[in-house]
Image: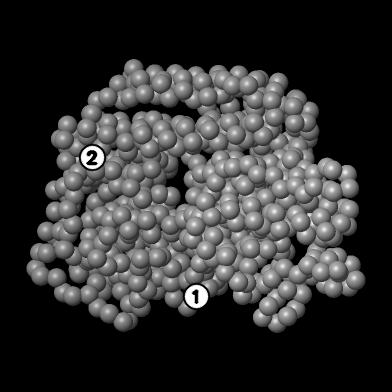
Amino acid sequence: MNKCVRASAMMEVRVRDEHKGAMMTLTQILHSDDLSALDSYMSTCFVRNMEFFKSLNPTLFAELSKPPITHNLVFDSTGLNILNIQDNALVYPANGENTMIATHLALSHTPMNNPQFLVHTNHLTLQKLDEDKIPLTASICNKIITLMQESGGSKSYHLPSDFLPSSTFFGTLGGIFLQLLLERGVYFHSLLLFEEYLDMLRIMLYFVDFALLFERVSERACYIFVKDLIHQEFIHTYFASRKITNNFLRLELFLYESPKIASAREVVHEAYRVNSRGWGSFDDEMIGVRNTLSNLSAHYPVLHLPERVEIPICVVGNGVSLDLLLPFIKANANNMLIFSCGTAIKPLKAYGIEPDFQIEIERIAYLKDVLKEAPLGDTTLLCGSVVQPEALALGKQAYVFMRGGSAGAYLFGGRSVVEFSAPYVGNAGFALAALLGEEVLICGLDCGYIEGKAKHAKNSFYGEETPQIPPNAFKVQGNRESSVYSDALFSLSARSMERCIKAFAPRLVLNLGEGAYIQGTRACDVSAFSLRELGKGKKQRAIESIKAHCSTDYTQVFEAYGDVGLSEVLAYKEEFLALLGVRVCSKRELFALIDRIHHFSLKMSAKNAFVGLLFEGSVGHILHNLMVSALHLPSDEIGNFYVRAVGIIREGVEKMAMSYRLLSMGR
């Protein structure tokens, strides 16, 4: 069984001290050594928690009502303990002392500075951005950091004792410390609690006021999983829903080790890392918008309402798996379409293979030089609209597609935006193949580091590489026998491909490489099958069919060709600045505000993808730097800092809006 429960309620469990007439909390009871009061507390707490779960999750309530199978609570003259029913062993050492209570009392003291807890920070530490690369975004963020330094900021971060950041607890062995924290008034910004055994959750019901726990966590930010993590997507949603505030600082606790605990931690660690990637910036998106306007002015044909072709499409990336697959690709070049992605073109050409389409999505200025060096030759270009016009001009034939995930793709409301085209160019090539073909072959899209091998194929732009697994990489399931490791960006790429397969639903996807396993694909050795021979002219007809679905009739391709959305950009700016114009005095209030603004950003990206994506990356950078700068202030009183920081943000965002106004006027 696996359960995720969410609620918002208030309930306090207190027990009357018959001698004093006062109501005692669990903290007071544990310090008093009054076993009768503890017995009364546990009975009352359990009954109230069962009532709470009965109304919240009847299925879970029914499971909790059954007799214990794996563990049970022991309460006798020696104190508290947990019994493993299967081997009659006690969880806590029985050495004459009540070690269970002592353990949890120790856990309840200053979690952020407690050796039993792990405090994680990701790579997005407080550092100034490159103002040469992203001047508008970097200027805002760097000024906020300078303001923090001038306001007495320290190298270490600071949170008030009654406020904890994103917290993940794996196996709490009774969870008494949680109740002790709640009774001290502690508030969790977000909480993910995993219990391996249902009986361990049942034992928590004797001590933890769950209604109060949900009340002391941000709205819809308290997740409880029992036995199994429901799905990786749930965990990714947990982090992504508060992408900024869950992104930097994370508190973790696991009181014992087991394969299931280790697996749960791996899932959480991966989601935490993935959450910190793929932000982009207003500056970069503006490059893409300018390139899109220029490329459309040159009347390049745009992919529009395409239909599937009836021959296999081989998507080729530049991963090291490509080295062993080149003979297969060359032998079957006449029986399939070849989509070369980015730098894969050089090893393909070096092996005597002519791709049918060269896929590019990068906005980088030096893409032109990369294509010249390949050399591009007569290969047809099929590029995202955001690609530099100078690079597109190199193609003897060049076509454009609206690459999902970039603001430029949604300018004018394109009717055939190719989603799932990020973060890598290989994702764009795969998305095109899954959209255009019934059968897709994957070659060299490794989505990871293969142990003992270099990262890229030989004869590529990267020269000689030594096998190296980055220190921040984590092991993932391999497509075949090799050991494979991933990182945040590779994981993001793999998840994008998996979503693409579900959305576009090609009939068959074969992964021929040795890299990461991609859900929805079939691992296959090239020696185990052969491609059918195509009839005369069938491949060329398929190529011409794809080209025929690229149109220069922009009034048909776009819903509102010519409207650059200036009014929407200005409206976004005003709403964003209005959200910042509230009083913020504490770090907890700042975290809550950042979540509200992030939700606004996501809502706008869903409602108006062009405007939302134009600003989303920079808003993320700004909010992140605002949050981390505030964390480095030694006091929780941040009102004055916040007011001055908002002034910096307002000035910078006005400059962004002005730059877009100038772009619209120059058309």
**Label 2 Cα neighbours within 10 Å, binned few <14 / some 14-19 / many ≥20:** some
Find the distance from the CA under tag 1 to the CA under tag 2: 41 Å
Frontmost residue, 630 versus 588: 588
The residue labelled by disc 1 is 482
Scheme of colours in the image: one colour
Residue 163 relative to residue 665: left or right: right
Disc on the earlier residue, 1 or 2: 2
| Amino acid at the residue labelled 1 | Ser
659 up-or-down from 345: above or below: above
- Horizontal and vertical percent position of residue 346: 37, 59
Does any portion of residue 270 appear in the rendered image? no
The residue located at (57%, 69%) in the rendering is 66
Frontmost residue, 395 versus 314: 314
- Horizontal and vertical percent position of residue 429: 32, 55
Foreground: disc 1 or disc 2: 2
The residue located at (27%, 68%) in the rendering is 508
| Amino acid at the residue labelled 2 | Arg
How many numbered marks does the figure carry?
A: 2
